[in-house]
Image: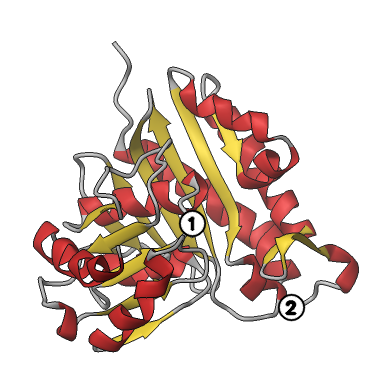
Amino acid sequence: MTPAFTQQAIVAVGQIMRLAAREIIMPAFGRLGPEAIRCKSGPLDLVTDADEAAERFITTRLRDAFPAARVVGEEAVAADPGVLAVLDAPGLVFVIDPIDGTANYAAGVPLFGVMVAAVQDGVTVGGAILDPVTDRLALAVRGGGAWEDDGHGHRCGLRAASAAAPPAMTGMIAWRYLPEPWRDAAPGLIRTMAGAWDYRCAAHAYLTLVRGVSHLALFGRTQPWDHLAGTLIHAEAGGYAACLDATPYGARAAGPGLLCAPDRVGWSAVRGLLEPSL
């Protein structure tokens, strides 16, 4: 029988993330020269020397702490897409986003995060999101709840926002990468909501969701390093998420976009506002 992924295990993962932030990510923040920043697929899809160094650091420490585990990192996949096949392997796999919100990080904007998910036999069993600027760390294990560690020995439970109708909802709408016809419908949704924004950072979108200070997040891209940790923490905090075609989100999700809401009823109401363009 495969051993359960425990709260102690995700806490250990979080400590590795904090070390990477303290030793690599924060010392380089605001100090990157042009030669340390490169474009991948476009002007907002960047990679920096700090991304790559942090991913190497986290990968090495995870392999030391969990010798039987495999690791999938965003930058490793960018260099070799074949690395994604590891997600189909049995056993424990860690999925790393070393710096989520790299465009913000490279511009000196303090809205970025570190995300790590633990996937056991294809199922997400652990998630961690770190805000390196504040050192606040959101953690969850499947079936074990979600909580935040403030970095000073204080721990509190996380809870998604209370149920609300779309006109009372606030949240992040990342419409740029939505496929049509969903992208065409996004402005109508924004006009309906009480407030909408785009942090250019999934990590901070999830942190606001699981702290209950926003209701909604709509994402166009569904890469595993951007969403596996966040969707698990959100679910353990009481929220509901699915791809826009109503299929579950997971390591190999192929649905168009991803929608998060406080509950299934709210999710359905928001998706219904996108329906007229379909």
For the residues bearing labels 2 and 1, Cβ distance under 8 angstroms = no
Label 2 – label 1 distance at C-alpha: 27 Å
Q: Nearer the viewer, mark 2 or mark 1?
A: 1
Sequence-wise first label, 2 or 1? 2
Q: Mark number for residue 186?
A: none
SS at circle 2: loop
Q: Is residue 214 left or right of residue 225?
A: left
SS assignment at label 1: loop
> Viewed as shown, does residue 78 lie left or right of 152?
right
Q: Which residue is labeled 1 in the image?
A: 221
**Label 1 crowd bin: few (<14), some (14–19), many (20+), radius 10 Å:** some
Q: Which label is found at residue 30? A: 2
Instruction: Report the quarter where the N terminus lies.
Output: top left
Q: Amino acid at mark 1?
A: Arg
At x 22%, y 64%, the residue is 271
Q: Nearer the viewer, residue 221 or 100?
A: 221
